[in-house]
Image (tube, rainbow, N blue to C red):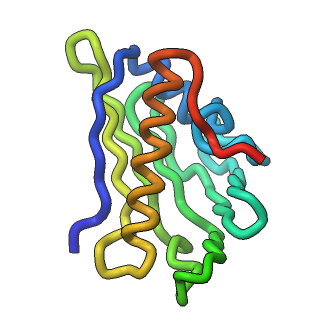
Amino acid sequence: MDNYSNTIDIKAKPDKVYDALAHKVPLWWSEMFKGASGKAGEVFTVRFGDHIHKTIQVKEIESNSKIIWYIEDSLIAIPELKNQTEWIGTTVIWDIEEKENMTLLTLTHMGLHPLIECYDICSNGWIQFINSLKLFLETGKGIPYKE
């Protein structure tokens, strides 16, 4: 089954994209951020209000080229979902590639595929926050989840 994947082009250098993914998660994903995300082995939690959270371990981090996150814990406590913990045990891979005067960023979420219940909700969420990341990198202001 195909895992969720999305590639966008960003008018920014790979080091800026890497820095945003490794050190500036609250500026584009969720301001409700605790922990650290800049080194392998570090753990952080992002929250989206009281009913949605993800606790993520940085599994691999290669400067300006790749970041891999492992989802240790997750809850998507919304009434539409029977299985509210589908993200647990999934992996998010960020591939950063320089292309002419821009960066190609590919997000692959291993384990997020059309057969799981939250696929539509979660893939739409990724689109929203990838666009926020792009906006943050190109204008200096993203649209993260706010408390």
Q: Residue at coordinates 53% horizontally, 24% vertically from top-left?
A: 136
Residue 47 locus on image (x, y percent): 71, 56
Q: Residue at coordinates 45% horizontally, 61% vertically from top-left?
A: 91
Q: How many marks?
A: 0
Q: Residue furthest top?
A: 101
Camera-side residue of 92 and 132: 132
Camera-side residue of 113 and 98: 113
Above-or-below relation of 65 to 35:
above
- In the rendered image, the quadrant that contains the N terminus is bottom left
Residue 45 occupies quadrant: bottom right
Q: Residue at coordinates 31% horizontally, 41% vertically from top-left?
A: 106
Above-or-below relation of 115 to 26:
below
- Position of 115 with respect to 47 (left or right) is left
Residue 95 locus on image (x, y percent): 35, 39
Q: Residue furthest front?
A: 79
Above-or-below relation of 23 to 126:
above
Residue 111 in sight from this viewpoint: no
- Position of 106 with respect to 144 (left or right) is left
Q: Residue at coordinates 54% horizontally, 52% vertically from top-left?
A: 59
Camera-side residue of 31 and 17: 31
Residue 130 locus on image (x, y percent): 44, 40
Residue 88 locus on image (x, y percent): 56, 73
